[in-house]
Amino acid sequence: MSDVPIEIYAHRDKLHARTTERERNRAAAYIRRRRAQLETLQQAERLRAAGAAHAAAVFGPGYSGLGGNKSTEGKPRILYPKERKRPRSHLKEIFFTRAQFRQVALEEEVLVPIRLDFDSEKYKLRDTFTWNLNDHTIPIGLFADHLCEDYQLPPAPFVESIKRSIAEQLNDFHPHKFPEHAQQTSVVSDDSYTSHRDDDLRIPIKLDITIGRLNLVDQFEWDINAEYNQPEHFAQTTCLELGLAQEFQTAIAHAIREQCQLYTKSLFLVGHTFDGLAVADSDMRHALMDSLNGDVQRPKHLLDDFAPILSQLLPDQLERVEKEREREVRRNRRQTRTKRGPNLPDLNDLPKTYRTPYHNSVL
């Protein structure tokens, strides 16, 4: 066995002592860090237990004072609907109860086409919509107040005019009586009912709608005796096929209902019984479409008349359309003043739709 020099043992002891000291210092530093973390957690726990008054010491000031907001140091509280801040505190709130919803659900929906067209100083309002005749949850006056608030119109000249116009159109509305309903009240004659019956009562619908700079012109046939014909579904399909905005969807549905109402009112005034029998009045028969006799193919020279035409109007064309609309309004007012008693609506001069574009600063 060879002798090992003493210097080697001394060097090894020195290395071991140095390593042991380094590990001891590392363990002591780790213990100090863990104690500091424990003290921080214990302090936070004490502050949490003290209540929300010391929350800012834990979570900081938050958004206090930033942008004029209030401090977030207060304890959060649930706000109930009656405590919320209303954006239109000067107007009566539109509120519906569950009992009102149940009552409306039990009633049949009867949509009345409403047309608004007013000029007052620098303001012009042109709008069309439908109103459920059996829905009494919203008074007309409250609707007029909120409509003026939506369009930022002065309430003084417009609210009363809107209320009066809607009330007159609702009172003047005559619901269509479908043949299935009319049979129950019709008087049975000596002639066979089925031999003279013709439920087909088709009318020409003519669309001329201008919204913004877009103008839609179209013509098609519509059976007013078909109870399940829905103008809203037809308008939705048309807008999907032509790529039109939703503004056109509501305008098309309104135009269909408005023209159907003109023909229904005319038939009612001439004494038609809506029981499937032929129309007795010669002028009304001429205004209606001929009954289908087996050939449903349209002649080629009429194909262009029964096709949608969508065009973008230039500024000079828009000005010409505006002047034409003003002449039409003045003509209708003169005809209204000269009428005495019930008169047949003019089926050759169907109303056109001009809607006022409302520019929103957000959308």
Image (tube, rainbow, N blue to C red):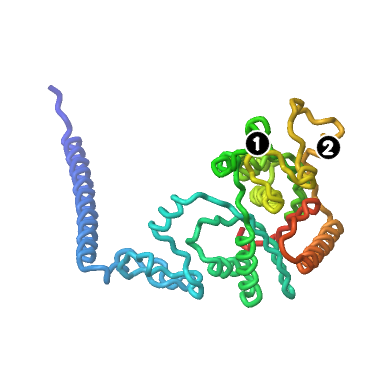
Residue in the foreground of this view, choosing between 59 and 316: 316
Q: Earlier in the sequence, mark 2 or mark 1?
A: 1
Residue 354: name its quadrant. bottom right
Compared to 223, does 327 lie above or below?
A: below
**Which secondary structure lies at badge 1?**
loop
Other residues around mark 1 within 10 Å, as few (<14) / some (14–19) / many (≥20): some
Residue in the foreground of this view, choosing between 54 and 110: 110
Residue in the foreground of this view, choosing between 344 and 72: 344
Residue 299: name its quadrant. top right
Residue at 84%, 35% (x, y): give it: 302
Residue at 49%, 61% (x, y): give it: 136
Residue at the bottom extreme? 156
- Going by the numbered disc 1, the residue's amino acid type is Asp
Q: Is residue 82 left or right of residue 21?
A: right
Tell me where residue 79 appears, x and y as whole percent.
35, 66
- Going by the numbered disc 2, the residue's amino acid type is Asp
Residue at the front extreme? 190
Tell me where residue 27 appears, x and y as whole percent.
20, 48
* Foreground tag (2 vs 1): 1
Q: Which residue is mark 1?
A: 199
Q: CA distance from mark 2 to mark 1?
A: 28 Å
- Quarter of the C terminus within the rendering: bottom right
Residue at 40%, 68% (x, y): give it: 84
Residue 57: name its quadrant. bottom left
**Which secondary structure lies at badge 2?**
loop
Q: Which mark is residue 304?
A: 2
Residue at the top extreme? 1
